[in-house]
C-alpha cells in the first residue's frame, strides 16, 4: 500500500510540473558596433563603407554612419583622413582617400571613430600580383535552334597561372562574359545595345575547403593543394543566354591575389548565404578582421586578360 | 567545478575502501627486551587492543629482543613469529595465531561445461550467472549461452540464475569432465516487461561483468506503444539524444557514428526509422542487449563511444509459438518453432508501420488547403529471420538475417494563372503548372552465418561469415511549364531529375574463441578479415527539358578498403573474486587506396570488492575508428553518409579513463556512479557551410574533442515495483580548424544535467502502471546575435549574420512525462492477451526541436516590407497510444 502511495505521489509531482509556462528565448541585445567594409587594390583610391550592426530581427537596410572619422595610416604615419562621398553607383555612401592610391606590399592601418561607438581599427596589405599564364575556352556550345528562350550558354574555361612558392597564397578568380543585346528594327536592321559584362557564377555544390564559389561571382582559391606549382583549372560554365536577343562577346578573366582576411571573410560570407535552415545545416560563422567592430579591411592585387568566344 | 567534484569522489571512494584493512595496518611502536614470546604477545595486545587470539599451548619457548618503531601490526607479528611454525590469519575481523598448514597434494580438477537455456523454449541465455556454491567460484555464460568452469573433484552444487527466471540449483558428484545443459524456468510473475536500468539489480546475474550491462529484450519499456531498444538505451545515464529522440544516440560526448551497433556480432550502419523516432530493432526478435560506455573489452573495436551488442533470439525448440501486436505506429508478427525433433529451431519476425493510415489523409487535406493536389506517404518495415541447428553435441550452426528500410514519397501538382492589365493598355495572361515527385528509400541488410564448435570443454570457438549493407536512394523530379498566352504566345518548360545515392557494405570472416584453462582465468581471442565498399554520395542531375544535357552527372568514386583485426583479452579473478581484472590488446589495420593505417589499442579494467556491499571499478581504454559518419543535418536523415579513412582523413581515436563504484544493500537498493574523462582526436566533420552535396573528401575538417562527467544511478527492483533514478553531470566540447573559426565550442549534445526517473508499479496480478520522466539541460545551438549588410554591385544587398560563436545558446530545458498501463486480459486457454494504453508527453510539454530566423514579406503602403521573427518548431505533442498483443 505504501508503495502504491509513493508511486501515485511521484506521478502527481511529475504532472504538477505541467503548470510550467513555455520558456521563451532571451535573445541578447548587444550594443551596435561599427561595421567597416573596404576592399582596396593597387593604384586605386581606398574606399571604406562605415555602417553599424543591427538587431537580427530588424529590416535588412544598412544604417550608414555619416559622421565617422576615418584615418588611413602607413607604419603609424597618418596618410590621409578620408572624406565622405555619396555613391553615384546606387551603393551607399562611403569614405575615400582624396589623392592617395594604394600600393602593393604596404601595411595599411585604418582607424574609424564615430560618436557613440568604440574606436575600431584593422590592418592589411595588398599581396603581389600573379600573372595569368593562359586563358582559353573549350567545348563552347550555343543552344540549338528551337529551344526555349531561357536556355543556357555552355563552355569550359581553361585557366593557368603559377602559384608563388614559400607562403600561403589566396586568390579570387573573377570572370566576366561580355554580352551584347540586339533587336531588329522595322526596317530589318540590327541594332546593338552597349556591351554588358555579366559576372560568371559557379555552383556552390562544387565547393571544397580550398575552392569556394563567391556569392558575387568567381571562385575563391586557397593554394594548399597546389602550393608553389603551376595551376591549371578547367571550369565548366553554364549561364542563362537568349540567343534570339543576345550575342556573346569576350570572356574576361581577372586574377586577384588576395589577403588571407579577404579569402576568409568572403568564403564565410558566401557559404553563409548558401546554408539552408537551421534544422538541415549548422550555421556558418562570419569572419571578421575589424578590432572592436565587424567587417573586412583587405587588399588585393589583380591582373586581367580576355579571350574571344568562338564556335 | 567539475574537476573538483570528480576529485572529491575519487578520494571519498578510496577513503571508504580503506576501512576493510584496519586491524593489520595499525601502526605500532613497541620494544621487547628478552621477553618470552607469550609475554610479548600479551603486551602487544595491551598496547594495541587488537582482536588477536592464540592458544598458549602452541607457543614455542622463544625469547624476543626487538624494537619496532611505527611499524604495522602485520610487520610486528611477523617479526615476533619469525622462525616458528606459526602464522597470523584474519578471520573476518579477528586475528588468530595458528600453526602453518603444510602444503597438500591438490585434488584433481575437472571441467564442467555446457549451456544455460530457457526451460520452455530451449533458447540459450546470454551472460547468465553460474555459481559453484561450495567452491566459491562463479562464471557467466558467453554470447551463445556456453559456460565452462574448472572445479576440484567431489560433490558440487551448481546455482544458475538469470533475470526473469527462477534460480536453478543442482548437485552432482564430479569425477570427470562433465557436459550439462542447465534449463531455467521463466519466473511467471504478472508481466514480463520490467524497466530498463543500468544498476546491478538487473545485473545481479552478471555481477562479474566488468563492462556495461545487459538487459533482456522483454525489459524494454514502451514509447508511444512501441517497445523500442534505442529509446530504452537513451534512459541510461551518459546516453544523450536530441529532442524527442531525434538524431540518434550520443554516448558520453561521442557522435552518433561513434557507436558500434552489432546484430549477432555484425555491424549495422543505420539504426533509425523515421529520423530516429524509432529504432530498427523489432523487440520480438531480440534476446539480449549489452551497452558498454567505457572500459571496452579488447574483443570490441572500431568505434569511439560505445558498443551496443544486440543478440537475436534463436527460436523455440520445444513447440510452435507465435506473437502478434498492433498499435497506432506499427504492427508486428512473430512465428517460431522446432526443427527436426528439437535439434534446431526457426524464428521469423516482421514489423510494418501503419502510421501512413493517418499521415497520408492528413497531408492530402493540408495540400488541398494550399491549392495543391498530392500527398505524402511514409512507411517502414523490418524483418528478422533466424535458424539454428545442432550438427552434433559439439557443433551448432546459426543463420540470422535482418532487412529493414524506410520509404518516403512526397508528390503533388499545382497550377496558377495570372491575368494582368498592363500600363500600355495591353493584357498579360499566363498559366503555370508544376508537378513534383520526391522518392526516398533507405535500408539495411545484415546477415550472419555462424558455426559454434566446442573444441574441448575448456575451449569454445565461433566462426562467423558476416555481411552488412546500407543503401540510400533519393530521387527528386520536377516538371514545370509556364505558358504565356497574351500578349505573345510562348511556352517555357523545364524537367529536372535529381538523384542522390550512397551506401556502405562489408563482408568478411570472423573467428572468436573463449578459452577457460583454469579457475579464475578466461581468455578471449580471435580476429577478423573484412572487405568494405563505400559509395559515399553520388549525385546525378539531369535536365530532361529536351536537347540540353544539363550539368554532367557527378558521381563520387567507389572506395574499396580492407581491414584486419586481432585481439587477446584476459579475464582474471584474484583472491577468490575480491579482485577482477580484464586486460588485453586490440590490434587493427586498415588498407585503403595505397594508404595503410594500423592501430594498437590497449584495454584495462579492474574491479575490487573490498566488502560484500561495495565494488570499485576503474578502466583505461583506447579506441580507433576507421569509418566515419558525416552528418549534414540535425536529424538522423539518410543524407548522412559513411566514409572511410583515406589519405586525406586519418582514423579517429580516443582515450577514455573511468573510475566508479557501486553499493548495494540487502533490501535491493543499489547506488552506482562512474566518472569518466575522454580525449578524442582526428574527429571528422563537415567544414562549416559544407553538406552532403559537396565532395565529402574535400569538404571535411578534422579536429579534437573532450568529454568528461559523472553518471549516477539509484534504483531498486522487486516483483511489486521498480524504481530507477539516473543522473548525469557532463561536459563535452569540440574544436575543428574549419568550424567556428577554429575556436573550441560546446558539443551540440553537451547537456550539463540529465535526469531520468522511471517507475513501475504492479497492481494485483494483471495490471501494471509505468511512468517515465525525463529532464535535461537544453541542447546547445547557434543563434545570430546581430546583423549587418554588405553591398555588392549587381546583386541584392547581402545580410551577414554574426553568431558570436557556435552553440552559444541553449534550447529550453527538455522534460517529458510518459505514462502507460498494461492489462493482462484473463484467458482460459493458452492464448495470452495484453492491452496497453499509453500517453506520450502526458502534460504536453512543447519541447522545441529548433529555432530559426524566418522572414515574411508584407505590402505596406505599396512597398514590400520584410518582417523577421524567431520561430520555434516543436515536434511531438501529447500522443495517445493503444496496443493489443496476442501470444500463444
Image (cartoon, coloured by chain):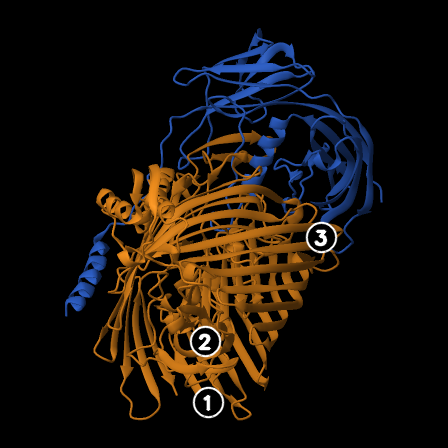
Question: Which residue is disc 2 drawn over?
Answer: B125
Q: Is residue A250 left or right of residue B397?
A: right
Residue hosting label 1: B318
- Left or right of A288: which side holds A46? right
Secondary structure under the numbered disc 1 in the rendered image: loop
Identify the mark at residue B551; answer none if there is no mark: 3
**Closer to viewer: mark 2 or mark 3:** 2
Residue B852, image x, y percentages: 42, 46
Q: Is residue B85 visible?
A: yes
For the residue labelled by badge 2, is the local secondary structure a helix, a strand or a loop?
loop
Marks 2/1 same chain: yes
Q: As rendered, which of A128 and B853 lies closer to the eye?
A: A128
Which x, y percent locates residue B491? 65, 57
Disc nearer the start of the sequence (2/3): 2
Report the chain shown in blue: A
Q: Quadrant of the C terminus of chain B?
A: bottom left
Q: Are marks 1 and 3 in contact (CB under 8 Å)?
A: no
Circles 2 and 3, Cβ within 8 Å, touching? The answer is: no
Tell me the tag on residue B566: none
- Sort mark 3 into few (<14), some (14-19) or many (20+) by Cα contacts within 10 Å: some
Instruction: Between residue B30 and residue B406, name the one nearer to us.
Output: B30
Q: Residues within 10 Å of mark 2 (few under 14, many from 20)?
A: many
Amino acid at each position: 500500500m505504501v508503495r502504491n502511495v509513493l508511486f501515485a505521489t511521484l506521478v502527481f509531482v511529475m504532472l504538477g510540473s505541467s503548470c510550467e509556462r513555455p520558456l521563451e528565448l532571451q535573445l541578447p541585445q548587444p550594443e551596435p558596433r561599427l561595421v567597416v567594409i573596404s576592399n582596396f587594390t593597387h593604384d586605386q583610391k581606398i574606399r571604406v563603407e562605415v555602417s553599424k550592426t543591427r538587431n537580427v530581427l530588424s529590416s535588412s537596410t544598412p544604417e550608414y554612419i555619416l559622421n565617422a572619422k576615418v584615418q588611413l595610416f602607413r607604419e603609424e604615419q597618418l596618410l590621409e583622413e578620408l572624406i565622405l562621398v555619396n555613391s553615384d553607383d546606387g551603393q551607399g555612401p562611403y569614405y575615400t582617400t582624396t589623392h592617395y592610391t594604394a600600393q602593393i606590399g604596404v601595411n595599411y592601418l585604418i582607424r574609424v571613430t564615430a560618436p557613440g561607438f568604440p574606436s575600431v581599427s584593422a590592418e592589411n596589405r595588398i599581396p603581389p600580383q600573379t600573372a595569368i599564364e593562359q586563358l582559353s575556352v573549350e567545348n563552347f556550345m550555343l543552344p540549338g535552334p528551337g529551344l526555349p528562350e531561357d536556355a543556357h550558354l555552355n563552355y569550359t574555361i581553361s585557366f593557368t597561372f603559377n602559384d608563388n612558392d614559400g607562403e600561403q597564397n589566396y586568390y579570387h578568380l573573377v570572370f566576366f562574359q561580355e554580352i551584347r543585346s540586339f533587336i531588329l528594327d522595322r526596317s530589318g536592321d540590327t541594332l546593338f545595345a552597349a556591351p554588358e559584362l555579366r559576372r560568371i557564377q559557379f555552383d556552390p555544390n562544387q565547393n571544397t575547403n580550398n575552392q569556394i564559389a563567391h556569392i558575387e561571382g568567381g571562385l575563391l582559391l586557397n593554394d594548399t593543394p597546389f602550393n608553389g606549382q603551376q595551376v591549371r583549372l578547367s571550369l565548366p560554365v553554364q549561364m542563362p543566354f537568349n540567343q534570339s536577343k543576345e550575342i556573346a562577346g569576350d570572356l574576361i578573366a581577372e586574377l586577384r591575389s588576395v589577403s588571407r582576411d579577404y579569402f576568409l571573410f568572403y568564403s564565410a560570407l558566401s557559404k553563409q548565404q548558401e546554408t539552408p535552415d537551421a534544422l538541415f545545416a549548422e550555421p556558418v560563422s562570419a569572419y571578421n578582421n575589424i578590432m572592436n567592430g565587424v567587417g573586412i579591411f583587405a587588399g588585393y592585387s589583380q591582373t586581367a586578360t580576355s579571350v574571344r568566344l568562338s564556335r | 567545478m567539475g574537476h573538483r567534484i570528480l576529485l572529491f569522489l575519487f578520494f571519498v571512494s578510496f577513503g571508504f575502501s580503506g576501512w576493510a584493512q584496519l586491524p593489520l595496518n595499525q601502526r605500532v611502536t613497541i620494544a621487547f627486551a628478552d621477553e618470552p614470546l607469550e609475554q610479548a604477545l600479551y603486551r602487544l595486545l595491551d598496547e594495541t587492543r587488537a582482536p588477536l587470539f592464540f592458544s598458549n599451548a602452541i607457543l614455542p619457548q622463544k625469547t624476543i629482543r626487538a624494537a619496532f618503531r611505527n611499524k604495522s601490526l602485520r610487520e610486528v607479528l611477523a617479526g615476533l613469529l619469525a622462525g616458528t611454525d606459526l602464522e597470523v590469519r584474519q578471520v573476518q575481523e579477528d586475528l588468530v595465531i595458528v600453526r602453518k598448514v603444510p602444503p597438500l597434494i591438490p585434488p584433481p580438477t575437472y571441467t564442467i561445461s555446457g549451456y544455460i537455456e530457457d526451460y520452455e523454449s530451449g533458447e540459450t541465455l546470454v551472460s547468465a550467472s553460474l555459481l559453484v556454491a561450495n567452491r566459491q567460484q562463479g562464471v557467466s555464460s558467453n554470447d551463445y549461452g556456453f559456460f565452462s568452469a574448472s572445479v576440484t573433484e567431489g560433490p558440487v552444487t551448481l546455482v544458475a540464475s538469470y533475470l526473469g527466471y527462477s534460480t536453478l540449483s543442482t548437485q552432482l558428484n564430479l569425477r570427470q569432465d562433465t557436459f550439462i545443459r542447465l534449463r531455467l524456468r521463466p519466473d511467471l510473475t504478472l508481466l514480463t516487461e520490467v524497466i530498463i536500468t543500468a544498476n546491478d539489480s538487473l545485473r545481479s546475474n552478471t555481477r562479474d561483468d566488468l563492462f556495461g550491462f545487459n538487459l533482456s529484450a522483454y525489459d524494454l519499456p514502451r514509447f508511444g506503444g512501441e517497445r523500442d531498444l534505442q529509446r530504452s538505451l537513451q534512459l541510461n545515464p551518459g546516453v544523450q539524444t536530441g529532442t524527442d529522440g531525434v538524431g540518434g544516440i550520443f554516448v558520453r560526448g561521442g557522435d552518433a557514428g561513434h557507436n558500434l551497433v552489432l546484430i549477432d556480432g555484425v555491424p549495422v550502419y543505420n539504426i533509425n526509422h523515421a529520423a530516429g523516432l524509432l529504432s530498427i530493432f523489432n523487440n520480438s526478435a531480440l534476446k539480449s542487449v549489452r551497452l558498454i560506455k567505457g572500459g571496452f573489452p579488447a574483443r570490441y573495436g572500431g568505434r569511439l563511444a560505445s558498443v551496443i551488442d544486440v543478440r537475436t533470439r534463436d527460436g523455440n525448440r520445444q513447440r510452435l509459438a507465435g506473437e502478434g501486436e498492433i498499435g497506432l505506429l506499427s504492427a508486428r508478427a512473430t512465428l517460431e518453432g522446432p526443427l527436426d525433433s528439437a535439434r534446431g529451431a526457426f524464428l521469423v519476425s516482421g514489423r510494418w508501420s501503419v502510421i501512413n493510415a493517418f499521415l497520408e489523409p492528413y497531408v492530402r487535406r493540408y495540400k488541398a488547403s494550399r491549392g495543391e493536389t498530392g500527398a505524402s506517404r511514409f512507411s517502414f518495415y523490418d524483418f528478422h529471420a533466424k535458424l539454428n541447428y545442432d550438427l552434433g553435441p559439439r557443433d551448432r550452426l546459426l543463420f540470422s538475417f535482418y532487412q529493414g528500410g524506410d520509404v518516403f514519397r512526397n508528390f503533388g501538382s499545382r497550377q496558377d494563372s495570372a491575368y494582368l492589365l498592363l500600363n500600355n493598355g495591353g493584357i498579360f495572361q499566363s498559366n503555370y503548372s508544376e508537378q513534383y515527385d520526391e522518392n526516398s528509400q533507405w535500408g539495411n541488410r545484415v546477415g550472419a552465418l555462424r558455426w559454434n564448435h566446442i573444441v574441448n570443454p575448456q575451449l569454445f570457438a565461433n566462426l562467423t561469415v558476416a555481411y552488412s549493407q546500407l543503401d540510400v536512394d533519393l530521387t527528386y523530379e520536377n516538371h514545370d511549364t509556364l505558358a504565356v498566352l497574351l500578349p505573345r504566345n510562348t511556352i517555357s518548360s523545364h524537367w529536372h531529375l535529381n538523384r542522390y545515392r550512397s551506401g556502405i557494405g562489408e563482408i568478411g570472416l570472423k573467428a572468436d574463441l573463449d578459452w577457460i584453462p583454469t579457475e579464475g582465468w578466461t581468455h578471449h581471442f580471435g580476429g577478423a578479415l573484412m572487405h568494405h565498399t563505400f559509395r559515399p554520395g553520388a549525385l546525378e542531375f539531369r535536365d530532361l527539358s529536351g536537347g540540353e544535357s544539363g550539368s554532367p552527372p557527378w558521381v563520387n568514386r567507389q572506395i574499396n578498403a580492407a581491414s584486419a583485426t586481432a585481439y587477446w583479452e584476459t579475464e582474471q579473478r584474484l583472491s577468490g573474486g575480491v579482485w577482477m581484472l580484464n586486460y588485453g590488446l586490440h590490434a587493427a589495420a586498415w588498407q585503403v587506396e595505397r594508404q595503410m593505417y594500423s592501430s594498437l589499442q590497449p584495454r584495462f579494467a579492474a574491479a575490487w570488492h573490498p566488502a560484500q556491499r561495495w565494488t570499485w571499478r576503474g578502466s583505461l581504454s583506447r579506441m580507433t575508428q576507421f569509418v566515419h559518419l558525416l552528418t549534414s543535418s540535425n536529424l538522423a536523415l539518410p543524407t548522412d553518409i559513411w566514409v572511410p579513412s583515406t589519405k586525406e582523413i586519418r582514423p579517429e581515436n580516443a582515450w577514455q579513463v573511468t573510475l566508479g563504484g557501486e553499493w548495494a544493500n540487502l533490501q535491493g537498493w543499489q547506488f552506482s556512479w562512474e566518472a569518466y574523462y575522454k580525449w578524442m582526436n582526428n574527429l571528422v566533420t563537415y567544414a562549416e557551410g559544407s553538406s552532403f552535396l559537396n565532395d565529402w573528401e574535400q569538404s571535411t575538417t578534422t579536429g579534437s574533442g573532450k568529454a568528461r562527467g559523472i553518471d549516477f544511478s539509484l534504483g531498486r527492483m522487486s516483483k511489486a515495483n521498480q524504481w530507477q533514478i539516473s543522473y548525469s553531470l557532463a561536459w563535452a566540447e569540440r574544436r575543428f580548424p574549419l568550424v567556428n573559426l577554429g575556436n573550441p565550442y560546446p558539443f551540440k549534445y553537451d547537456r550539463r544535467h540529465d535526469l531520468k526517473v522511471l517507475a513501475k508499479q504492479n497492481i494485483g496480478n494483471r495490471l501494471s502502471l509505468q511512468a517515465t520522466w525525463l529532464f535535461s539541460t537544453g541542447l546547445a545551438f547557434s543563434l545570430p546575435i546581430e546583423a549587418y549588410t554588405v553591398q555588392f554591385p549587381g546583386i541584392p544587398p547581402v545580410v551577414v549574420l554574426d553568431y558570436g560563436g557556435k552553440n552559444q545558446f541553449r534550447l529550453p530545458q527538455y522534460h517529458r512525462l510518459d505514462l502507460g498501463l498494461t492489462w493482462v486480459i484473463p484467458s482460459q486457454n493458452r492464448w495470452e492477451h495484453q492491452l496497453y494504453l499509453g500517453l506520450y508527453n502526458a502534460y504536453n510539454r512543447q519541447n522545441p526541436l529548433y529555432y530559426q530566423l524566418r522572414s515574411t514579406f508584407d505590402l505596406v503602403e505599396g512597398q514590400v516590407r520584410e518582417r523577421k521573427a524567431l520561430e520555434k518548431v516543436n515536434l511531438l505533442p501529447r500522443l495517445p497510444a493503444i496496443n493489443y498483443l496476442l501470444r500463444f
